[in-house]
């Protein structure tokens, strides 16, 4: 069910959520202001846009998980990532990275304190069917690993 399961593999969700932001920060610092404007492939988002997307996804998935825990029979609201990107063109890499890291810290604390029962609360995802709160966390972890690989590809460019 998790579209990013292959990126996550058998890694621990909380370990990934705790460690990936530092790796992203390190890569961004080595890229510098000009490097974050590069993309891993033609027609794909550049690193600055990937950082904004990570921040937006952190916001959306954190909200989904909190709504799932607090709202009976919650139905997830999908979002169009490309349209979200279009409404925030003024967000630079530093701002996006700061927002991503701050929301990650908050979301990580939230996920760490969920009881086993809360992790198993089921919600309806219009595109994926029934999923539970821990699937949301696992999707978030796999999603960012997917994009981390893209940022690493940019960092490896000459």
Image (cartoon, helix red, strand yellow):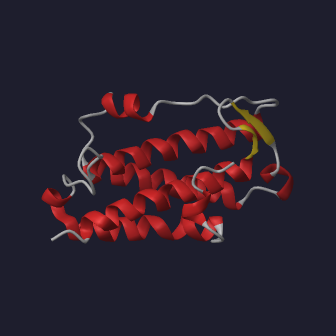
Query: Residue 145, image x and y in percent?
Result: 48, 62
Residue that lies at the very extreme toward the front in this rendered image = 42
Residue 106, relative to residue 91: is it above or below? Answer: below
In screen coordinates, is 75 left or right of 151? right
Residue 23, relative to residue 89: is it above or below? Answer: below
Q: Nearer the viewer, residue 55 or 98?
A: 55
In screen coordinates, is 8 left or right of 25? right
In screen coordinates, is 58 left or right of 69? left
Q: Nearer the viewer, residue 18 or 137?
A: 137
Residue 30, relative to residue 136: is it above or below? Answer: below
- Picture residue at 61% right of the left edge, 28% below the top: 77
Quadrant location of residue 109? bottom right
Query: Residue 22, image x and y in percent?
Result: 41, 69
- Picture residue at 64% right of the left edge, 64% below the top: 13
- Picture residue at 67% right of the left edge, 41% below the top: 66
Query: Residue 44, image x and y in percent?
Result: 29, 46
Residue 70: tell me if it is visible. yes
Tell how many labels. 0
Q: Quadrant of the C terminus?
A: bottom left
Residue that lies at the very extreme toward the right in this rendered image = 117
Quadrant location of residue 75? top right
Residue 28: tell me if it is visible. no
- Picture residue at 22% right of the left edge, 56% below the top: 36
Query: Residue 61, image x and y in percent?
Result: 58, 43
């Amino acid at each position: 069910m998790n579209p990013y399961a292959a990126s996550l593999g058998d890694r621990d969700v909380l370990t990934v959520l705790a460690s990936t932001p530092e790796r992203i920060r390190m890569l961004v610092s080595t890229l510098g202001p000009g490097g974050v404007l590069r993309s891993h492939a033609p027609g794909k988002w550049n690193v600055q846009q990937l950082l904004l997307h990570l921040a937006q996804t952190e916001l959306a998935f954190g909200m989904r998980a909190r709504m799932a825990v607090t709202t009976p029979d919650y139905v997830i609201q999908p979002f169009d990532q490309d349209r979200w990107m279009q409404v925030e063109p003024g967000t630079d890499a530093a701002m996006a990275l700061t927002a991503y890291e701050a929301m990650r810290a908050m979301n990580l604390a939230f996920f760490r304190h969920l009881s086993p029962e809360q992790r198993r609360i089921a919600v309806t995802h219009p595109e994926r069917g029934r999923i539970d709160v821990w699937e949301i966390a696992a999707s978030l972890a796999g999603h960012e690993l997917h994009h981390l690989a893209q940022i690493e590809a940019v960092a490896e460019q000459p």
